[in-house]
Image (spheres, rainbow, N blue to C red):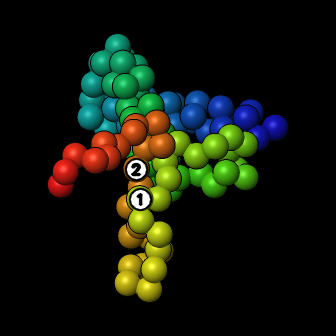
């Protein structure tokens, strides 16, 4: 059910971008379609980058993990995230 809800939200976002581009910016139908086709994945990526899903919500391991644990010095929303798929260099002598 959750996957169907997310798919419906992405479809609604696509329709919203089509209408916004065609009516608001007076783009042609083909331009609005391809503009919306490009904008939807970018919007979904930015949403997940700004508000990463919790492990319980996503049902799999996190793509982004905290670089440094949140200690009294920084607010919860200001924590830095790094991709878990990218390994960092260690022992560079720095």
Q: Is residue 48 left or right of residue 78?
A: right
Residue 44 at what x, y percent from top left?
Answer: 48, 39
Residue at numbered disc 1: 67
Residue 50 at what x, y percent from top left?
Answer: 43, 55
Q: Is residue 47 left or right of residue 34?
A: right
- Front one among 21 and 83: 83
- The kind of secondary structure element at disc 2 is strand
- Front one among 25 and 70: 70
Q: Crowding at label 1, few (<14), some or many (≥20) Cα neighbours within 10 Å?
A: few
Height in image: 32 above or below 17?
A: above
Residue at numbered disc 2: 82
Quadrant where the C terminus sits is: bottom left
Residue in the image at 52% along x and 37% along y:
13
Height in image: 6 above or below 66?
A: above
Residue 57 at what x, y percent from top left?
Answer: 70, 50
Height in image: 64 above or below 34?
A: below
Circles 1, 2 touching at the beta carbon (< 8 Å): yes
Q: Crowding at label 2, few (<14), some or many (≥20) Cα neighbours within 10 Å?
A: some
Q: Marks 1/2: CA distance?
A: 6 Å
- Front one among 81 and 14: 81
Q: Is residue 46 visible?
A: yes
Q: Is residue 23 visible?
A: no
């Amino acid at each position: 059910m959750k996957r169907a809800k997310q798919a419906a939200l992405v479809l609604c976002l696509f329709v919203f971008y089509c209408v916004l581009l065609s009516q608001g910016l007076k783009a042609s139908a083909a331009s609005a379609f391809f503009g919306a086709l490009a904008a939807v994945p970018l919007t979904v990526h930015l949403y997940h980058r700004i508000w990463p899903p919790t492990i319980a919500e996503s049902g799999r391991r996190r793509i982004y993990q905290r670089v440094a644990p949140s200690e009294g010095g920084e607010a919860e929303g200001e924590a830095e995230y790094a991709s878990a798929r990218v390994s960092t260099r260690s022992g560079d002598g720095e």
